[in-house]
Image (spheres, helix red, strand yellow):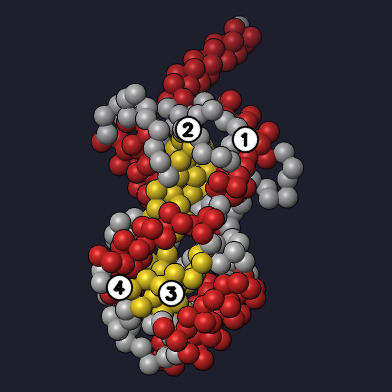
Amino acid sequence: MRRHSLCLVLAAIFLVLAGLRPCLAQGVMIVQSSSIEAYQEAVSGFNQAFAGSTSLPGIASIQPSQSIVLDPAAQDAAAVVGLQYKALLPEVVVAIGNGALEAVKDLNCPIVYLLVANPEAIVPPRPNITGIKMMPAPLAQLTAIKAALPAIRKIGIIFNPSTSVDFFILAKAAADSLNLLLIKSPASDDRDAILQIGELAGQLDAIWLLPEPTLVSPNLLKALPLLSLEKQIPLIAFAPKYLETGAAMAVFSSPEQQGAQAADLVRRLLSAQPRDALLPEYGKEVTVQANNRIIQKLGLIFNNTSPSEGR
């Protein structure tokens, strides 16, 4: 009798698990590169925004089914993720950070990445891979810059033509529409960038630094704040941490904003029938933070009511 009851219990558990399986198969598996605060904030932004997915046709049962935090020191991240993927069969995998994208890149399901500095260096463009770029859209950034620092008009942009020419083309069009003059400072390495921006400094009202892995170095990050103070022109950076080293202002998409936009991208992927490939997107929302000490030293008027959205 006891054995019979145990068999009934096990059978019931099996049926429950089997009943759950279709729900998990329509879920979202979130993979974090590590447990750092920025990634946790991105997960929070994703989950909060994704909570409204039940209102969309065809995805009433979808919820984030699993969040996996990788050990950055581990050598078998791809194997760990592969096992979890086979167990959950999620419809979409969300990769947060470079390590996460590296671990999931060989999966065949739709993959949405965010907080990845240079995704093309990890995996070539493929129809099943999309995501949110680290930078907000050029128009969003320039709109925010113009609103926050209304006195500036001539902006020097530091970029690498081999990696960011598309961004520069969009930025030039955005600047023209806002009556701003964008002065390009193309460079192939940090020394070239320092030299070029130094030569252009007398023509500029501001220096705009992009997250260029080939250019951003300790040398560049030391030289630009010094040049900014010497020439009395603000340095506009792409992350708030650079405010501590002398940037006057930072314009960026926060991890929460990136997470929320990723949730919208996932919703569109899941509700599309047939499922279409979606191109990676620039951040749609921006956050502006200022270094008040530098702003005062440069004698700038900073408007703290800059916009938070744009394209």
Which mark is on residue 128?
2
Between discs 4 and 1, the one toward the N terminus:
1
Between discs 4 and 2, the one toward the N terminus:
2
In which quadrant of the rendered view does residue 106 lie? Answer: top right
Horizontal side, residue 302 vs residue 100: left or right: left
Q: Horizontal and vertical percent for residue 236?
A: 44, 75
Q: Residue at x 44, y 38 (%)?
A: 64
Q: Amino acid at mark 4?
A: Leu
User: Which numbered mark, 2 or 1, is in the foreground of this view?
Assistant: 2
Between discs 2 and 1, the one toward the N terminus:
1
Q: Residue at x 54, y 12 (%)?
A: 11
Between discs 4 and 3, the one toward the N terminus:
3
Horizontal side, residue 172 vs residue 209: left or right: left
Residue at label 3?
Answer: 156
Q: Label 2's element?
A: loop
Is any atom of residue 219 visible in this view? Answer: yes
Q: Horizontal and vertical percent for residue 90?
A: 49, 29
Residue at label 1?
Answer: 81
The Cα atoms of the two marked residues, 3 and 2, are separated by 36 Å
Q: Amino acid at mark 3?
A: Gly
Query: In the rendered image, which quarter contains the C terminus?
Result: bottom left
**Label 2: how many Cα within 10 Å (few below 14, some 14–19, many 20+):** some
**Label 1: how many Cα within 10 Å (few below 14, some 14–19, many 20+):** many
